């Protein structure tokens, strides 16, 4: 039996019509007796049902005992949202929630024709939903009458402050009647949010929904360790492994969004992008393509993705690690909504593992550490989906029987099955072969003697070229198809570097490098017949030994630029040539790819 005690009857009917049987924690909280008509500061995560919550909280005050609204005039309630997409989403939610009350809901958002909005406001509206900048414009131009406003709602107030809308919000709230009711909703209650609430709310009731403490219990968090050069390949395999109806890939920059967009398009994925350089019309088309199934992958920056709602989103991939725990929770909160399960996958290059661990710890999230799905894993998952295809279990229809017999008379059952498999795989991007990153859980080799038998190699770069293990090790792993655990000691000399490899992997390493023994752009490697002479004479010749504890690389595994003018580039020297020609101070070759 469905019961909605304390809710306006018309609203309760709308909930039942919509299929609601129970309310979410935040929706129950705003109906509590302790709130009444008081102001409220509500902290609740994305996807917790906030829009319906403030719709329920405002209804008694806006209707004022009546069953339906009268003729529209100056707005009674104002809802402010950070982005155009979120504002229009809120408008849609309030329209079905207030449908049986006869309410008129209008929107005022950037990117829309302001003259059309002005005419709508002149005809009257009970509730206005808008973005801060556009609402301020209407107030300034006297097209939005705030004189009869009973309530104001700030939805996702933390994001509005992050986007720099504080001045606009203050202007809007100061233009509203002083006796209005103010409800503020925020994922987190930071100091700026608390300050804003103290300035523009009166004795606000603090409500913390239970979903704030239990961070998205329907989300499976996975931290996937990759080599820096395999980051994009890992994302491709994750997309292929899950084959999600909708997937959202987050990047930190527009440039990365554009790059991944081009890469995934080339691989046959139906993909759209959201970044700050797109027009409102382009953003609208991109989101609509995701909603109607024409696109299955959306690549976006954090700012561009604020407020978007993709129903049934099953997978979130963090191509770049979030900058803080709040961003991690906000990104991940796009999935695992309304009782559905979702996956949040963090792509973690080796150099960013510590950062990822701190990020997860700060967000109070326990993630499963693993490698990304391999090519074999993706193929096996494809086979599972094929075997579960309902077409294999459905009864043969009468109109199909004759043609089925015709097929079997011309071709064997194996040939027909093979054709079915080929048709199933058409259009699916081939999975990528990923490099082995070694054990996911870091196992520290203590005594050096545990490394076992080894073979020594010499690499034709040294201190003179600023050679560093930080970029040399990934190069050895990539070209030689080995892992970090196959590499033992690294002894840096002035003009060369000695590298110790496990004996068991040496032959495969030599075969992978090839007969020319070339690693990258003129850097050669040669096998030694015996361990190198690391006597004091050699070290004296090389000069004082430098520490090769490199500056930390960024999350993409890129080598940081040096600040000292005139430093030689570690990739500049070719064998037998100095890094610089005498006197000119210019490098003679380029950095390896």
Image: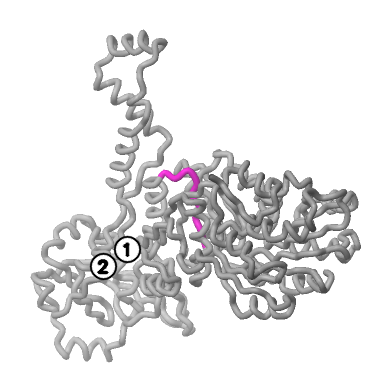
Q: Residue at x 58, y 56 (%)?
A: 49
Instruction: Let me know if residue 249 is in the magenta part.
Output: yes
The circle drawn on residue 114 is: none
> Is label 1 in a helix, a strand or a loop?
strand
User: Which quadrant: the C terminus?
Assistant: bottom left
**Distance from the alpha carbon under mark 1 to that under mark 2:** 8 Å
Q: Position of residue 420 (x, y in %)?
A: 34, 26
Instruction: Give how far across and how far down residue 16 sits, in percent.
Output: 61, 44
The mark found on residue 369 in the picture is 1
Apparent side of residue 7 relative to residue 356 in the rendered image (left or right): right
Q: Is residue 69 above or below residue 268?
A: below
- All told, the count of numbered labels is 2
Q: Nearer the viewer, residue 100 or 411?
A: 100
Dot 1 and dot 2 residues touching (CB under 8 Å): yes
What secondary structure is marked by label 2? loop
Q: Is residue 210 left or right of residue 106?
A: left
- Neighbor class of circle 2 (other Cα within 10 Å; few <14, some 14-19, many 20+) is few
Magenta stretch bounds: 243-251
What percent of the width, then of the height, locates residue 515? 21, 56
State the residue at coordinates (39%, 47%): 242
């Amino acid at each position: 039996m469905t019961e909605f005690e304390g809710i306006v009857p018309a609203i309760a009917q709308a909930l039942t019509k919509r299929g609601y049987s129970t309310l979410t924690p935040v929706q129950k909280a705003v109906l509590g007796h302790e709130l009444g008509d008081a102001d409220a500061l509500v902290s609740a995560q994305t996807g917790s049902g906030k829009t319906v919550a403030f719709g329920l909280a405002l209804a008694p005050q806006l209707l004022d005992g009546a069953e339906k609204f009268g003729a529209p005039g100056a707005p009674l309630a104002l809802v402010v949202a950070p982005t155009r997409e979120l504002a229009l989403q809120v408008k849609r939610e309030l329209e079905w929630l207030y449908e049986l009350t006869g309410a008129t809901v209008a929107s005022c958002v950037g990117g829309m024709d302001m003259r059309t909005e002005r005419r709508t406001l002149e005809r009257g509206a009970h509730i206005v939903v808008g973005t801060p900048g556009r609402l301020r414009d209407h107030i300034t131009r006297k097209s939005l009458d705030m004189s009869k406003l009973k309530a104001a709602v700030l939805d996702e107030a933390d994001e509005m402050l992050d986007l720099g809308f504080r001045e606009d919000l203050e202007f809007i709230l100061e233009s509203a009647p002083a006796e209005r009711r103010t409800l503020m909703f925020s994922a987190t209650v930071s100091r700026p949010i608390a300050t804003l609430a103290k300035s523009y709310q009166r004795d606000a009731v603090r409500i913390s929904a239970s979903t704030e403490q239990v961070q998205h219990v329907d989300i499976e968090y996975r931290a996937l360790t990759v080599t820096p050069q395999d980051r994009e390949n890992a994302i491709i395999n994750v997309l292929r492994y899950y084959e999600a109806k909708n997937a959202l890939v987050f990047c930190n920059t527009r440039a990365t969004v554009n790059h991944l967009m081009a890469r995934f398009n080339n691989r046959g994925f139906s993909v759209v992008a959201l970044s700050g350089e797109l027009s409102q019309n382009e953003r609208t088309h991109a989101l609509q393509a995701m909603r109607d199934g024409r696109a299955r992958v959306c690549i976006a920056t954090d700012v561009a993705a604020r407020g978007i709602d993709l129903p049934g989103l099953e997978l979130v991939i963090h191509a770049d690690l979030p900058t803080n725990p709040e961003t991690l929770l906000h990104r991940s909160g796009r999935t695992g909504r309304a009782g559905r399960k979702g996956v949040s996958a963090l792509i973690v290059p080796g150099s960013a593992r510590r950062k990822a661990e701190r990020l997860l710890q700060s967000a109070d999230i326990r993630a499963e550490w693993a490698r990304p799905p391999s090519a074999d894993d993706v193929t096996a998952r494809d086979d599972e989906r094929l075997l579960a295809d309902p077409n294999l279990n459905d009864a043969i229809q009468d109109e199909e029987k004759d043609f089925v017999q015709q097929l079997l008379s011309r071709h064997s059952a194996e040939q027909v099955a093979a054709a079915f498999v080929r048709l199933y795989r058409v259009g699916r991007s081939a999975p990528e072969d990923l490099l082995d990153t070694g054990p996911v859980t870091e196992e520290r080799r203590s005594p050096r003697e545990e490394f076992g038998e080894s073979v020594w190699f010499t690499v034709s770069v040294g201190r003179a070229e600023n050679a560093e293990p930080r970029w040399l090790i990934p190069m050895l792993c990539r070209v030689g198809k080995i892992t970090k655990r196959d590499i033992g000691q690294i002894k840096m000399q002035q003009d060369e570097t000695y590298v110790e490899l496990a004996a068991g992997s040496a032959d495969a390493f030599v075969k992978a490098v090839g007969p020319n023994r070339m690693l990258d752009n003129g850097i050669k490697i040669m096998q030694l017949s015996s361990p190198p002479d690391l006597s004091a004479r050699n070290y004296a010749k090389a000069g004082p030994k430098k520490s090769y504890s490199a500056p930390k690389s960024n999350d993409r595994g890129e080598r940081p630029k040096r600040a000292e003018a005139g430093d030689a580039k570690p990739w500049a020297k070719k064998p037998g040539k100095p890094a610089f020609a005498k006197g000119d101070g210019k490098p003679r070759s380029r950095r390896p790819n």
